[in-house]
Amino acid sequence: MPNPYWIKVYFDKDTEPTRFSPDRQIEEEGSAFRNALKKARDCKAYAVCLCNRGKELPLAIRLRNDNHSLAKYPNTGKEHVMDCRFYSRLNPEGGQKTYTEKALNESNSGIVKITLDYPLQTRSTVIEQDKVIDDEIPRRPYRNVKKRNTMSLLGLLHTLWETAGYNVWVPGMDGKRNSTQLGYNLFRQAEKIQSNGILLSEVLMTPARRGTMDEARNKSVLQSAIEKKRRLVVVSELAQFSDERKHGTGRLPVQNFAGMPFLNIDDSRWKSALQRFSIEAHAWAAGFKIFAIAVTDVPGPASATVRQVGLIMVSDRFIPLDSAYESVVEKILYENKRTFIKPLVYDSAESEYLPDFCLTDVTAGDSQPFPIEVWGMKTAEYLAHREVKTEWYNKEFGRFGWWSWDAAQDPQGVTIKPFPPAERDVMNEIMK
Ligand SMILES: [Zn+2]
């Protein structure tokens, strides 16, 4: 299918790029377009889509079964105009591939449709509320399992984070991110996410300060949830760690909660959440930023009871992190003014092939971002998985290389190698 927009293909430095109008984008053996893609890929160049005026949106050149073709570059789909064939708010090449169409899909009008593990709409009785919701978010399975027909609360948090672009870092964002601005941006994404027929923005509360529009927004969400008998979904940053808060105060310890009701949670449920999210709980005690996503019963005017809670750890730049080792790498990337993506895992199995980070200012094979891996464990099961994943990296990226740090053997990071030097910063071009 040709793109209705012009495409520009770059080659080596000494060759002028070629522009292809829609009717010249013929993807046939021997066509000028196909030859150009082959030539570009062979010299590690790239192609761009010109649908969005003034922006050169990068495209990946893929080689599959001897055919060269174009694909969306990760995390750039929503930059294309809506009738461009590369437009998408989803990134199905990442952790989202764990879902069936039933769990996650995108309508032609750009609405992301999700089926959550539980309905946000309740009927009326307290008994029914008790029945339908499982208090615990299941842990990620280690090995591949069948695709999921529903999404967990944590998967929903990843959807919000990724569609709002908070798993992407470009140096130009330095000093510009904060918790309430994140709250606003997550809310804007929620206006285009539907769960079981309900627009997520009608039930989502996000960080807000007193006396702001954000507070007013949270208040109106609360009012509407009461009237329509819907559960609330709350995303908020945990308050600073203290032993008292760890042991439980009867309330979810969050900050920037203007406009939210009190979020009641019994101490045993809170402790069980901290046990299941033990990496995040340790990081909280160590002073990291931790965000919670919680789903409540239908709220009252002053309080709501939390039924499920999930946690993620993020860097000072709000980039999600799976371990303290990853925070070391993320900080080096930041200090070196690199541009990168953190692929999010959603509800996929631990053994899915996702790099821990991807540099977008270095091109690996197929004009893909350059993968970075942090080996963080020594268990027999992990080591077996590591062997298989290493083979995968060598096969997929061997020609251009990949980066790794064996943090399990060298937790001090003595052996951390320099990253490959930056070449062309595709994300920076989009974000500016
Ligand atoms: Zn486009």
Image (cartoon, helix red, strand yellow):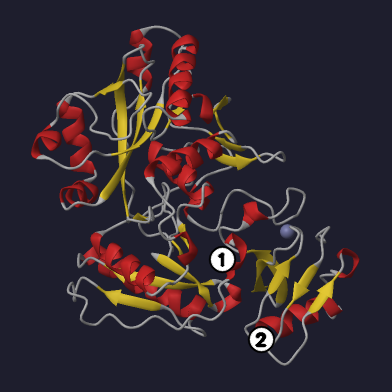
Q: Judge by depth and name the residue closer to the eye, 45 or 70.
A: 45
Q: Quadrant of residue 251?
A: top left
Residue 292, by quadrant, is top left
Q: Taking 78 as reference, is 106 above or below it?
A: above
- Residue 297, image x, y percentages: 36, 18
Left/right of residue 174 with respect to residue 107 in the rendered view? left
Q: x, y percentage for residue 50?
A: 76, 64
Q: Secondary structure at mark 1?
A: helix
Q: Quadrant of ligand 1?
A: bottom right
Q: Quadrant of the N terminus?
A: bottom right
Whether residue 119 appears in this view of the structure is no
Image position, residue 84 (x, y; %): 76, 54
Residue to which mark 2 is pinned? 42
Check disc 2 and report its element: helix, strand or loop.
Answer: helix
The numbered disc on residue 427 is 1
Label 1 packing within 10 angstroms: few (<14), some (14-19), many (20+): many
Q: Residue at x 20, y 42 (%)?
A: 240
